[in-house]
Amino acid sequence: MIVLLGRFTPGVPAFRWLWVAVYSLFLNLALLPAGFGKHIYGGDMSLRATTRTNYYTLTLTLYLDQANSTPDTYEREIILYIFRKSDHVRVNTATVRQTGSQRVRYDNQACADLRNLSVLGMNYSTDVYLNPATYNDPGGYYVVWDRCCRSADISNIQNPGGEGMVFYMEFPAIVRSGSAFLDSSPAFNFPNGEYICVNKPFKLDFSATDADGDQLRYSLVTPLAGYTDNTPQNTVGDGRSHTTYPEVNWSPGYSAASSIPGNPALKIDPQTGQLSVTASQTGLFIFAVLCEEYRNGVRIGAIRREFQMPVVDCGNNTPPPPIISYRNVETLDLPFCEGATALLSTETNPLWSYQWQRNGSNIPGATAPTLTVTEAGDYAVVKSFATTCGNDTTSKITRARVLPPPAAQITPDKKPPLCEGASLVLSVPQENAVTYQWTADGAVLPGATGTSLTVTKTGLYGVRATSSMECTNRDSLSIVVNPNPKATLTSSASAICQDNEVRLDATVGSQYQYEWYFNTASLNTSDAATRLVGQGGTYQVRITDGNGCQALSAPLTLAVIPRPAMQFDSLAPVCATRSEPLLLAASPAGGTFSGPGVTGSQFDPGKAGAGLHTITYTYAGTSACPVTISRQIRVEPPADVNLPERVSVLMGSTVTLKPTVKGQTNGFLWEPPESLSDPTSLNPEASPEAPTTYKLTVSSPGDCRTEKSVLVDVLKRMFIADVFSPNNDGINDAFEIRNTDQFPDCEITIYNRWGEVVFQSKGYDKPWDGTYRSQKVQAGSYHYLIKTNQPLLPEYRGAVLVTY
């Protein structure tokens, strides 16, 4: 965007106007309040989707006056505000920071320098996350930034020095109807440095690009003034919500449709975005372009750019138009080969300055009399005076066309690689006025100048195609001739045993496929190098490797040997504790037995262990075909029986014998049977008159026997005296308790009438002699407690009388 500083006065020569403008500028700058935006001539915004989901790059581009400002006056960072369009509620803020800059290039640099025109495009950017839960309103959203103030030298609006500026863009919701909606806004192309000469036709490309290919429509609109003003506290917008943003007030005779007066006035092509005008008066004019984005006929977003353009009196001093030459010949059509370059040139003369353009845009740094062309496009050169300011002229368009190279893609007549003994035809498409040369491993093949080549060997084959315009193209194809695989076939046995199978083994290799044949008939194809067969006949295998090369094995013939009749006696269950091995019998004789616990022709249940076992009989005879027959034998474990070593019973009473038995049982037998209620019961009652040992025999499957014994003690009751006289006369001198030997763990405690223990012992080997602490106790009654520690007779309580 280009702005000419100072006030324009029609009829005043340009050089006088310039000095007035410069003086006025310095005076105005000295009087500006801090924070004013008079160095900002305009700008625009864009929003571009990134590769990260829901992340977008938000960019504000400002066009800044370098000639009349310093970098310390440029904003380092700017806060942008994002609002919802439906209710104008602010939903977020984004702080953008300086990310790069680019100078605006002028066609006529001498005039730009003389008019002190130097404009810098400064980009402010940041990546923002748009949360789908927030940015889903069908009405969409807008981004805005308010700033005051404008240059006081603007000719077409009222009070320009006090009017603010608003930078504004709209974008759609990122979720529509529940689905993600991806969109990047349009982005204006970087402008050429231009000024308008009064009364002369002028055109300027003001188009934008859209990353999504959406339709763009352009129109001229009134710039926005916003809500900032030239008071120091209100030079930057504070992000408040507003339903509308005020527009600038046009000076009389001006409007959006006539922002630069002329015949015609400033207008824009709604499809291409090209501005055109033949200005009728000088001045500094502001205008705004709205670029609307449509997808499938629906408006989804918009961007705005504000711009200022000076109209000056360029006078009638115009250089002659430049001529573009190629190889010293004027050319308007420049065909050149793809990948090549073409050097365009114009007159070399220190009186002139040049600015080359491609497709109407200035090429940065292309100000020399020559230009190296590397891509297609419409090229022109703008010629102006090198040291004085005057009109400039533009050459005719030279259209550069990139010629496609001749076709040279090599196509084989069959899919490579080749197998040993095969051939391959390589060919390229035939074109008129094209010559060909084939090579092998970089060496030219004499006479190989046609569109095809037959190859039978490994190598790198290439072709070079050259057109009449000397455009060349090359292609190459590596051809590998692979050896055929080795196909061998072996068997795991020389013959097939009846009802058995033999394994066939073919050559093993990576990515091999095998097609098997029986008596010349194909069986199937697989990637298995082995096959089990049970039929007599002739076998072969065809091997195909990973390159498609094949080989067929030599035939292999196998015969079937019949099997003999086999017999093997059945085996009854046996006990694991059987002492003698079991003799095995099978026919025909001469074979071998195998299996757990088998030694020779005997089976040892103890070695085999409990469980179901398989015994196999193998008979080979005189052939190489062993035949087997199997039988199963169950080895039964004996019952698990537990009995206490001894139990007790009071004389004259009975006790129930209670063994624990685990496992299957067939019967029980107690011995001796005398004094037992039932000697074949698991739990008989015993009533011995004297200590007796009983043996239990438990029978279980497999003819197993388990024996356990228990001793039944016969206990006598205690007999306790009720009086004794410890007077040392040899008669009843001690407290007598009979049969204590039946209760060796008994505990005896004797108390006096006060509850004091006067005697205590475990066992009663030494009876109480009527003393306590070596002194005779007084005559009287003493209580006793006798614990037998025997469940049958838990305890005795009573009293004994001591007399003298």
Image: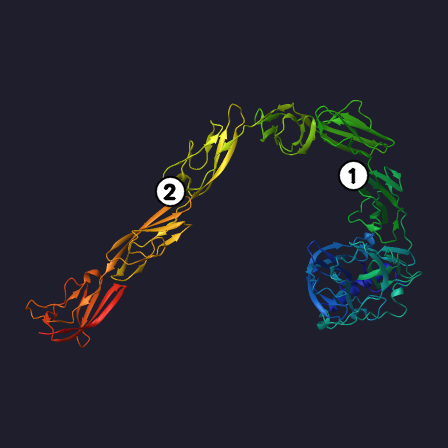
Task: Indicate which disc, 2 or 1, sits on the residue closer to the N terminus.
Answer: 1
Quarter of the image with the N terminus is bottom right
Q: Is residue 657 left or right of residue 619?
A: left
Q: Which numbered disc covers residue 339? A: 1
Question: Which label sits in the foreground, 2 or 1?
Answer: 2
Give the amino acid at mark 1: Gly
Give the amino acid at mark 2: Thr
Quarter where residue 634 is shown: top left
Q: Which numbered disc covers residue 756? A: none
Q: Which residue is mark 2?
A: 577
- At a point 69% along the width and 66% down the height, the residue shown is 92
Closer to us: 526 or 298: 526
Quarter of the image with the C terminus is bottom left
- At a point 83% along the width and 54% down the height, the residue shown is 111
Closer to us: 658 or 360: 658
Q: State the image coordinates of residue 696 (x, y, percent, origin top left).
A: 33, 51
Quarter where residue 224 is shown: bottom right
Q: Secondary structure at mark 1?
A: loop
Residue 51 in view of the camera: yes
| Residue most extreme to the right | 263
> How many circles with numbers are drawn on the protein?
2
Residue 481 in view of the camera: no
- At a point 83% along the width and 44% down the height, the residue shown is 376
| Picture layout, residue 774 above or below residue 371 | below
| Picture layout, residue 137 above or below residue 414 | below
Q: State the image coordinates of residue 372 (x, y, percent, origin top left).
A: 80, 42
Closer to us: 587 or 369: 587
Q: Residues within 10 Å of mark 2 (few under 14, many from 20)?
A: many
Q: State the image coordinates of residue 396 (x, y, percent, origin top left).
A: 90, 46
